[in-house]
Amino acid sequence: MKEIKAFIRPNMLNAVLQALHEHPDFPGVTVSEVRGFGKVAGRDSSQPSGYGMVEMVKIECIIEAGHAADVVQIIQDHAATGRPGDGKIAVHDVNSVTRIRTGESGRDAMI
């Protein structure tokens, strides 16, 4: 299993979510509003919000390893504007998943 975390522009969220929803094996997603800054030329650290932070959206999901590349591609295709600040996608190995309600684990906890 893999965990995918993507940081994208808020205005691209609906397009990404719609595309993920259409993937037949996509189990679900968690979305959080976040703020941060990256290494960008001309970043102004004197702004009142601190360090020139920008609003982003974090998408998180756990998916079977065989579908991770598809999900990454979907996010990239639907979140890209071609401008700096489009975001990042990270993929991590997941050792186990347990559904709290039933105690199911592994693949059974994903569906």
Image: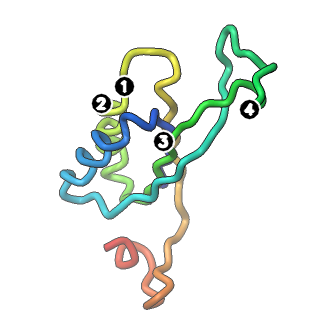
Q: Which residue is mark 2?
A: 77
Q: CA distance from mark 1 to mark 4?
A: 26 Å
Name the residue located 32 percent from the left edge and 35 percent from the top edge: 73
Q: Which residue is mark 4?
A: 49
Name the residue located 49 percent from the left edge and 78 percent from the top edge: 98
The amino acid type, in three-letter code, at marker 4 is: Ser
Q: Label 1: how many residues lie within 10 Å, few (<14), some (14-19) or many (20+)?
A: some
Say if mark 1 contacts mark 2, CB within 8 Å. yes
Q: Which residue is mark 1?
A: 80
Kindly state the secondary structure of the residue where label 3 is placed: strand
Location of the C terminus (image quadrant): bottom left
Q: Label 3: how many residues lie within 10 Å, few (<14), some (14-19) or many (20+)?
A: many
Nearer to us of marks 1 and 4 is 4
Kindly state the secondary structure of the residue where label 2 is placed: helix
Q: Residue furthest front?
A: 48
x and y percentages locating residue 44 in the rendered image: 74, 16
Quarter residue 72 falls in: top left
